[in-house]
Image (spheres, rainbow, N blue to C red):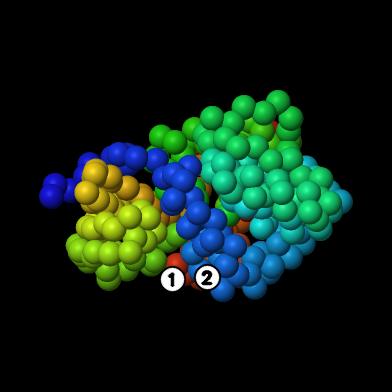
Amino acid sequence: MQKPYLYEPSSNKFWNDEHISKGMLEAHLNKEWEAATRKYDFVINSVEWISSIAPPSQKNKLLDLGCGPGIYAELFKHKGYDVTGVDFSERSINYAIESAKKENLDITYICQDYLELDLEEKFDLITLIYCDFGVLSDINRQLLLKKIYSMLKNDGVLILDVFTPFEHEGKNECKNWNYFSNGGFWCAKPYGCLEAFYKYESNTILNQSIVLTDDEVKCYNIWEHMFTCDELLSELKAAGIWNVEFYSNIMGEKYINNSKTLCVVARKEM
């Protein structure tokens, strides 16, 4: 099996796959899993910190990119923000809409790829949480940052987190084969799955899953780019003028050199 070229796309999209999206939603909603959403204690602490450095009394209009089923969005709303959430998963957005109705929360949800987002309104605060930025190619990262910059008000704030090279330090390329006789995450039917971990230059890795059933073969490529402070700062500066602060995570812990994650608070300057 040939190693994929850098940022080679998946053969199939999975965000709106009928079966896979069920598992993704379950992963989001399980408060004890460190999966699609971080564990709930971490989420709570993140919201507390974000609301302390960009309080809703000063930064009221909030855009949550990659909002999933609205876990952060609802907590932000309870803090007093005017919240808009965007996610590509129709199942997650539908869940978020119904949850907001049940809780009587006025939250705007948009089902769209945020790379294609074109909103006229401006925001005080934009969040991109759980290292979502690093799954994008370098071209799409710049596209997104420029889009974010244009959607922020003057002195608006972008808060996002990424993985650093320490996340996969010492891990070697590998391949594993498994068979799921009763189905699993990727498919409801029995399937085999060849999982591969590849490393590339410039701190980029690929988690690849090739799923084989009696009917078809599907390939899912999940890319992840890891950042140093200097590299993240360089990408931000290529998209606009910012005043930047770094932290070890999106709970606001002081940055340390061997942290596995990196959080940036970037304030738009004109």
Is residue 135 at all visible to an observer of this figure?
yes
Q: Point out residue 153 in the picture as x, y percentages from the top left corner.
A: 73, 35
Residue drawn 59% across the image and 62% down it: 29
Residue lying furthest right: 57
Q: Which residue is mark 1?
A: 258
Instruction: Locate the C terminus by quadrant.
Output: top right
Residue drawn 27% across the image and 68% down it: 171
Q: Which mark is residue 59?
A: none
Q: Report crowding for label 2: few under 14, some 14 to 19, many 20 or more residues within 10 A (C-alpha).
A: some
Q: Point out residue 114 in the picture as x, y percentages from the top left corner.
A: 56, 37
Q: Amino acid at mark 1?
A: Asn
Is residue 240 at all visible to an observer of this figure?
no
Q: Which residue is mark 2?
A: 33
Residue drawn 60% across the image and 70% down it: 31
Residue 183 lies, with reference to residue 20, above or below; the image says below
Residue drawn 52% across the image and 70% down it: 33
Is label 1 in a helix, a strand or a loop?
loop
Q: Point out residue 223 in the picture as x, y percentages from the top left corner.
A: 36, 49
Give the label, 1 or 2, closer to the camera: 2
